[in-house]
Each structure stands twice: as structure tokens, then as C-alpha cells.
Amino acid sequence: MDYDIWKATELTEKYLSGVRGAIPLAKEQIELMLRIIDACNIKVERILDLGCGDGILAASILQKYTDASGVLLDISEPMIQVAKNKLVKYKEHFDFVLFDFGESRWAERVKAKGPFSVIISGFSIHHQTDERKQKLYSEIFNLLIPGGLFLNLENVSSSTKWVSSLFDEYFIDSLYNMHLLNGDGITRQGVSEEWYHREDIEVNKLAPVEKQCEWLREIGFCDVDCYFKVFEIALFGGRKPR
């Protein structure tokens, strides 16, 4: 797959120390995710984190739902290792699966640990084609318990190039401010050049959040919405009917 670049340790470390830490309003996104989960009025027993990265989303859920267990899946072995280190005190709660959810066989790898109360994904599904995204959302639907929740915190496409440029400048400012706090000495111009020439940019296949919400409704999800959006960052999803 063209997104095999995420298997590289160097890129993983660069992402986690840079872009991941500079995501605007990250704290608010996680707080909203937890609020939505709580409002579903379901027992959060099993969770699945697709494209888990460093495990921050799963860790946030487990801090609140301390009896939950589940699966963290990612294509990147370095990412899986970082997640294991972050979740070391919860190691008895999770299985870590190194697999590519771009292949439909991923569902069989986690099925025995389900069905799941909550399935989450963070900044990962946008590497798939639109056709694969739709199939993946169906696979997710089938792995949820009745009343279960799917939340996707994701990069989505802008409506115009101008709006996309607003997002780029917003994120560059956030990255630059993070570097200032860290005392890295990089200029804003340097941050901008890194942003526009980052290695992963070619593997992004962004889709409008409105279109993706419509796909979820067609599959059978209810209460589908975009619960949060700031330019090209969106939290959207829905529930499986009871």
C-alpha cells in the first residue's frame, strides 16, 4: 500500500513529536468524544481503536471506563510499540493487532474480541479511497453492539482551495507556537516549508464530511452527525440502532 510509509520509525517519531502534538483544540475534541460516549447510555465494555497511533484515544476512554477492554489496531509496528508503552498500566485490558484495515480481512482478526460498544478512529481512515471508506464503515457497523457508537476524528476535505489554505495557515501557526514553546529555534517559514513538503501528504485521500455522514446513514447508522469541525478536522459518526 502507498501508506506503508507509516511503518517507518523515523516518520512515526516525527509525526508524534510534531503534527500530532500540534493538532488545534485536541483537548476539546477528546472531551467531546467522551461526552458523546457517555450520552449513549450503554455499558462501555469493549472498545476498538482503528489506526490507533500512539493510543491516545483509547487511553482517554479507559481513564473514564476503567473496566473496559478491547483492541488497538494499526498498520505501523512503531506506532503499536508507542501505544503499548503509553498504555502499559492497562496492558491486561488490550490486545494490540498489527494489521492493515485497508484489507477487509482485518474484521476477522478482531471479531472474536467483539462485538464492540465503541469503535473509534483518529486521523487514519483518510488514507483509504472513497470506495474503501464505505466498505470499512459497513465492516465497522457489523462489529458494533446494538446501540453501539462509531466516532471518527478525521481529516476531511475543504469545500474550496481557499478554505483549504485557511486550514493550512491555521495548522502552521499551531505548529510554530508549539516549536516556540519547545525552544526549537525553527522559523515560521521553516515550519511552513516542512508542512507543505511533509512525507505523508501524498497518501491523503480526503473526502467531505457531509458525504461521509451520508454514507453512514445509507449503511444504517442513526443519529449521524458531524459533532465538531474546524476547517479540515472533524469528529463525526453515528450509532447502530438498538
Image (cartoon, helix red, strand yellow):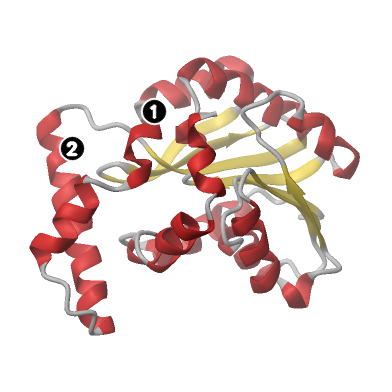
- Vertical arrangement, residue 1 with respect to residue 116, above or below: above
Answer with left or right where residue 203 lies relative to residue 219: left
Camera-side residue of 176 and 230? 176
- Vertical arrangement, residue 69 with respect to residue 219, above or below: below
Residue sticking out furthest to the right: 112
- The answer for how far apart the CA atoms under marks 1 and 2 are is 14 Å
- Quadrant for the C terminus in the image: top right
Precedes in sequence: disc 1 or disc 2:
2
- Vertical arrangement, residue 205 with respect to residue 76, above or below: above
Q: How many marks?
A: 2
Circle 1 crowding by C-alpha within 10 Å: few under 14, some 14–19, many from 20: some
User: Where does the image place residue 74, in percent across and percent down from the top left?
Assistant: 64, 46
Task: Examine the rendering and report whether any part of residue 117 can be seen.
Answer: yes
Does dot 1 land on a helix, a strand or a loop? loop
Mark 2: amino acid: Ser
Task: Examine the rendering and report whether any part of residue 242 can be seen.
Answer: no
Q: Which mark is on residue 205?
A: 1
User: Where does the image place residue 112, in percent across and percent down from the top left?
Assistant: 91, 39
Q: Could you tell me which residue is drawn at 49 percent across and 57 percent down?
A: 12
